[in-house]
Amino acid sequence: MKVILILALTFLAFGCNEIKTALNETPSKVTSGDTTVASSDVTPAVVKPTERIALYWENTSAPHPERKPWSDYLVEKVKAKITTYDKANDVTELCPKYKSLNTHQKLKLWGEYWVALCSFESSYKPTSASVDVGTQENKDTWSIGLFQMSVVDIKNYRIQNMSYKYDDLLKPLPNIDLATTIMAHQIEKKGGVFLASGVYWAPLKIGGKYTRIKEIKALVKARVPACF
């Protein structure tokens, strides 16, 4: 009996020391799959930012990675004016479900609308230039760049803090800046995107000789399924 009692006491003492040692070990370990890491190294999952909005002109008949900055800048400029764009009384003609879209979806819609318009204005060519309604001797009156903008319209539309020259508007970003600004002006003053009069871009004129409203709507429908 004494032998059994001594063995039992010895086992208990040894076991307590093992438990005490285990409790004092730091840091504790967390095992994930085949990898063991210290619990102090485990961090909460990082919430990814909203996925960037890729637009059609980045990948037409071939990939065009050089156009990605165009998309990013266009989306940025529209986002800054989204409260004005929301006021377009004909926006549901482009996107029947517009009022139920979140901001990300709205930006995708407007981005693809602009890309569709660009295909008819310049075929995505930043250096496109036409005398159009201007005069041959004054390049500031020419329609140029992605959206066929004119230098004189900065003054005509009384746009503040913008001073682009002819060569500037042959670059994608300044051209986008002026185009998105004039559209915001058009919506504020005329109420819509498609107009029978007072529209800036001929493809958007209702009943006009060069109207492409039907085609633009079709392109938007194909590229922004959230609208339908």
Image (cartoon, rainbow, N blue to C red):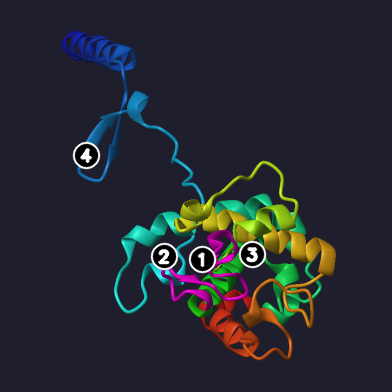
The quarter of the image holding the C terminus is bottom right
Classed neighbour count for the residue bearing mark 3: other residues with Cα under 10 Å, few (<14), some (14–19), many (≥20): many
Which residue is found at the position 59% from the left and 72% from the top?
A: 113
Say if the magenta span includes residue 143: yes
Instruction: State how far apart marks 2 and 4 are (Cα).
Output: 55 Å
User: Alpha-carbon distance for marks 3 and 4?
Assistant: 43 Å
Amino acid on which the number 3 mark rests in the picture: Lys
Instruction: Give the mark nearest the N terminus, 1 or 4.
Output: 4
Q: Which mark is residue 106?
A: 3
Q: Secondary structure at mark 3?
A: helix
Residue 77 horizontal side relative to residue 190, left or right? left
Q: Look at the numbered disc 1 and give the secondary structure of its residue.
A: strand
Q: Which residue is mark 2?
A: 127
**Marks 1,4: beta carbons within 8 A:** no
Q: Tell me the residue that label 1 is attached to.
A: 144
Residue where numbered disc 4 is placed = 35
- Please state which of the two labelled residues, at mark 3 or mark 4, is closer to the viewer: 3
Evaluate whether residue 86 shows in this view: no
